[in-house]
Amino acid sequence: MSQTRILVLVGSLRAASINRRLAEAAAKAAPEGVELAIYEGLGEIPFYNEDIDAEGKVPATAQALRDAVAAADALLLVTPEYNGTLPAVLKNAIDWASRPYGAGVLKDFPAAVISASISPNAAKWSHDDAVKALGVAGAKVVEEASLNFGVIGQRFGETHPADDAEALTQLAATVHLLAETANARANA
């Protein structure tokens, strides 16, 4: 059996963000045969603009994202909540990966969303907006793999999520479901 590759996009650009640490913990919790790669460079991709999304004009950073998604078997978004919605870098990544319209790399692509915030709401608004944007872009969102973490400042302020047994179990289940969906798609 070949390795299942899951590309992870983290919505917080801060190097030590708890969302980034959740992505790292998800990579640690991945079952054998599943590899998670956290994408670097979301902050360098220009905002989507159809004027520069043309042959010979696509920015290298945007093309690199498209290539990374195309090389993966599934996509995992880890998102905080900024002003009640998902961060601009994640929406921008979805926009670039969704083009060209109807034939972008996200078409029929398995995806899941993990959301986390300091509020008890657990970034559910951001989660819902990410699911909506992915769905409109053509991705197949695996809702059963969804995961929401609230009050993360208290829960993970002093402890890395990789050291939290309950979080690792939840993250492993999310990664497992997403990988199963990706494998079913590959074998269809």
Image: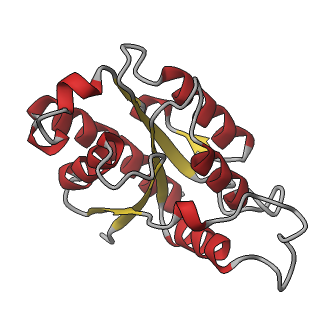
Going by the picture, which residue comes out furthest to the bottom? Answer: 56
Is residue 82 visible to us here?
A: yes
Going by the picture, which residue comes out furthest to the right? Answer: 51
Residue 9 image position (x, y, % from top left) = 47, 54
Q: Is residue 115 above or below residue 45?
A: above
Position of 42 with respect to 13 (left or right) is: right
Q: Residue at 19% of width from left, 49% of height from top?
A: 29
Q: Residue at 74% of width from left, 40% of height from top?
A: 136
Q: Residue at 19% of width from left, 32% of height from top?
A: 156
Camera-nearest residue between 183 and 31 = 31
Position of 87 with respect to 17 (left or right) is: right
Going by the picture, which residue comes out furthest to the top? Answer: 120
Is residue 108 visible to us here?
A: no
Q: How is the image coloured?
A: secondary structure
Q: Quadrant of the C terminus?
A: bottom right
Residue 92 image position (x, y, % from top left) = 67, 52
Camera-nearest residue between 1 and 68 = 68
Q: Is residue 15 above or below residue 35?
A: above
- Numbered marks: total: 0
Q: Is residue 177 above or below residue 116?
A: below
Q: Residue at 12% of width from left, 35% of height from top?
A: 158
Residue 16 image position (x, y, % from top left) = 29, 50
Camera-nearest residue between 117 and 138 = 117
Residue 114 image position (x, y, % from top left) = 41, 36
Q: Is residue 98 above or below residue 153?
A: below
Q: Quadrant of the N terminus?
A: bottom left
Position of 155 with respect to 146 (left or right) is: left
